[in-house]
């Protein structure tokens, strides 16, 4: 009996399985039974020996990257590049083709997302040096008071985190919140538990928008790779982000912070000099790129007669242009006359360039790994697996992102790599690319551990031990990932 005969047999009799009602679940069950029957009768599996070679090449290449980064203390840039070449060679790609894939992957990422990262870092430096971020954080905590401080902390992080890279938001916000919380009435006697009640929701807010809401580099790159609608992704991302942040922030922190002791943080952030700009001005600067990008998405919804007159909205909504315009507007609004002070300019750009190099090199190497996996055929393998219907595209995207996150420790690399190998699956299955983008983002933050630079950064700024960092930060990230997936699955069925 051939494979074709098995498929025809399934098509003829599978729908008549006794006791099995219709629906997507039933269809998926029957598809799984068909695969099992196919393997049992004709000895053919959806995964061939060549596919197993590709999977093993990917596993070994990523494992070598982990060893170099964690054990060898090699920078992720070199570790991921070495792993990329090893994957290509073990998968049977010629060395010339592997090198070309590495160059293409790194160039594609740095040519687009690299500009977004750099502009986001410079905007974060302006908010820090101008004291605008400090004023906004203090205003948020004053608004909610001591009793609502965890909610004020979460709200501040969600707003401030919109245009900022996660590491930038963390370095910017946590020391400010710690100082602002200490000034709140009733803080005395709360101890370490009270401090963590404010700091952990801020981490949750920063992580959620980093994973789920464009114009963050990860979700934005996934939007471009999968051909998703940017406006829809922003709206759905916010819908998923709000309940996820509430659960992983103020609610979860009440439980995971108990019994945790913190020492004076190893890492601190110095405040800028001079008077802070008005809070509303700072808020306007933070929200401006999001408003511009959302306005660009609205252009596609306009009636044909109106669209030509508002064509500039599409240009203004380009993420690079939106962030560039925000940077140019922020300089005079945040600094006023201090803009012309050489020390102010030096502080802005030194704070921007210091983290930019490491971040850009790491995401460039992540893009190289993604392209090698695609060139070796991993994307085609996932298309075939999804075609058998055994796993939904949304769940498949989440699982792949989780695996790469656990292996490499980088949420951005996990997003870049998964988004690069999923377009074929989305096209073959007809899945909503917007929900797949959010599933990838959710999976990219699963269980931060020792190979994640963010793990050590959080540990330094919280002042927790390694064990307590696992107990708080790692658990928080896992709750964000799983809750995000659940919300995405529910949303994809209701939409």
Image (tube, helix red, strand yellow):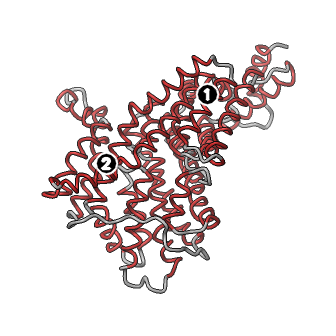
Residue shown at 81% from the left, 22% from the top: 38
Residue shown at 83% from the left, 24% from the top: 39
Q: Quadrant of residue 473?
A: bottom right
The N terminus sits in image quarter: top right
User: Closer to the N terminus: mark 1 or mark 2?
Assistant: 1
Q: Which residue is mark 2?
A: 122
Q: Residues within 10 Å of mark 2 (few under 14, many from 20)?
A: many
Of 394 and 269, nearer the camera is: 269
When the figure is inspected, residue 89 is found, relative to residue 245, above or below; the finding is above
Residue shown at 20% from the left, 51% from the top: 331
Of 46 and 418, nearer the camera is: 418
Residue 476 in the image, given as x and y percentages of width and height: 57, 60
In the picture, measured across the screen, residue 367 lies left or right of residue 128, that is: right
Residue 395 in the image, given as x and y percentages of width and height: 62, 40
Task: State the SS at label 1.
Answer: helix
Residue 69 in the image, given as x and y percentages of width and height: 61, 45
Task: State the SS at label 2.
Answer: helix
Residue 179 in the image, given as x and y percentages of width and height: 38, 73
Of 432 and 262, nearer the camera is: 262
Residue 85 badge: 1
When the figure is inspected, residue 339 is found, relative to residue 116, above or below; the finding is below
Residue shown at 52% from the left, 77% from the top: 192
In the picture, measured across the screen, residue 200 lies left or right of residue 301, that is: right
Q: Are marks 1 and 2 in contact (CB under 8 Å)?
A: no
Mark 1–mark 2 distance (CA, rounded to whole Å)? 33 Å
In the picture, measured across the screen, residue 322 lies left or right of residue 34, that is: left
When the figure is inspected, residue 467 is found, relative to residue 40, above or below; the finding is below
Q: Quadrant of residue 79?
A: top right
Instruction: Give the number of the mark in front: 1 or 2.
Output: 1
Residue at the limit of the structure toward the left, as seen here: 337
């Amino acid at each position: 009996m051939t494979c074709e005969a098995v498929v025809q047999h399934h098509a003829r009799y599978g729908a008549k399985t006794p006791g099995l009602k219709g629906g997507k679940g039933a269809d998926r069950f029957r598809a799984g039974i068909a695969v099992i029957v196919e393997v049992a009768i004709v000895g053919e599996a959806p995964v061939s020996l060549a596919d197993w070679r590709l999977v093993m090449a990917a596993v070994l290449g990523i494992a070598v990257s982990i060893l170099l980064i964690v054990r060898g203390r090699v920078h992720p840039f070199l570790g991921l590049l070495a792993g990329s070449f090893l994957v290509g060679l073990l998968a049977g790609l010629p060395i010339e083709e592997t090198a070309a894939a590495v160059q293409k992957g790194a160039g594609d990422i740095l040519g687009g997302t690299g500009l977004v990262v750099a502009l986001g870092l410079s905007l974060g430096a302006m908010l820090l040096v101008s004291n605008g971020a400090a004023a906004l954080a203090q205003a948020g905590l004053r608004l909610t008071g001591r009793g609502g401080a965890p909610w004020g902390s979460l709200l501040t992080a969600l707003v401030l985190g919109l245009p900022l890279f996660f590491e930038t938001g963390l370095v910017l916000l946590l020391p400010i919140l710690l100082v602002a919380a200490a000034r709140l009435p009733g803080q005395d006697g709360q101890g370490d538990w009270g401090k963590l009640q404010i700091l952990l929701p801020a981490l949750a807010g920063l992580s959620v928008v980093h994973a789920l809401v464009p114009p963050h580099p990860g979700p934005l790159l996934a939007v471009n790779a999968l051909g998703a609608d940017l406006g829809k992704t922003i709206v759905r991302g916010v819908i998923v982000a709000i309940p996820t942040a509430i659960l992983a922030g103020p609610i979860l922190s009440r439980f995971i912070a108990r019994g945790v002791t913190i020492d004076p943080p190893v890492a601190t952030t110095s405040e800028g000099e001079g008077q802070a700009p008005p809070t509303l001005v700072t808020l306007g600067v933070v929200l401006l790129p999001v408003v511009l990008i959302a306005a660009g998405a609205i252009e596609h919804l306009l009636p044909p007669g109106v669209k030509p007159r508002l064509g500039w909205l599409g240009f203004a909504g380009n993420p690079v242009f939106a962030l560039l315009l925000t940077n140019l507007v922020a300089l005079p609004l945040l600094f006023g006359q201090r803009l012309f002070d050489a020390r102010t300019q030096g502080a802005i750009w030194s704070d921007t360039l210091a983290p930019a190099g490491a971040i850009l090199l790491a995401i460039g190497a992540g893009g190289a790994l993604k392209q090698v996996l695609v060139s070796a055929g991993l994307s085609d393998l996932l298309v075939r697996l999804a075609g058998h219907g055994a796993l939904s595209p949304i769940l498949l995207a989440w699982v792949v992102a989780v695996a790469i996150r656990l292996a490499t420790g980088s949420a951005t690399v996990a997003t870049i790599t998964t988004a690069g190998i999923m377009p074929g699956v989305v096209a073959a299955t007809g899945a909503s690319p917007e929900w797949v983008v959010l599933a990838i983002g959710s999976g990219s933050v699963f269980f931060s551990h020792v190979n994640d630079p963010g793990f050590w950064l959080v540990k330094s700024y919280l002042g927790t031990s390694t064990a307590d960092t696992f107990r708080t930060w790692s658990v928080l990230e896992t709750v964000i990932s799983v809750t995000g997936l659940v919300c995405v699955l529910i949303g994809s069925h209701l939409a």
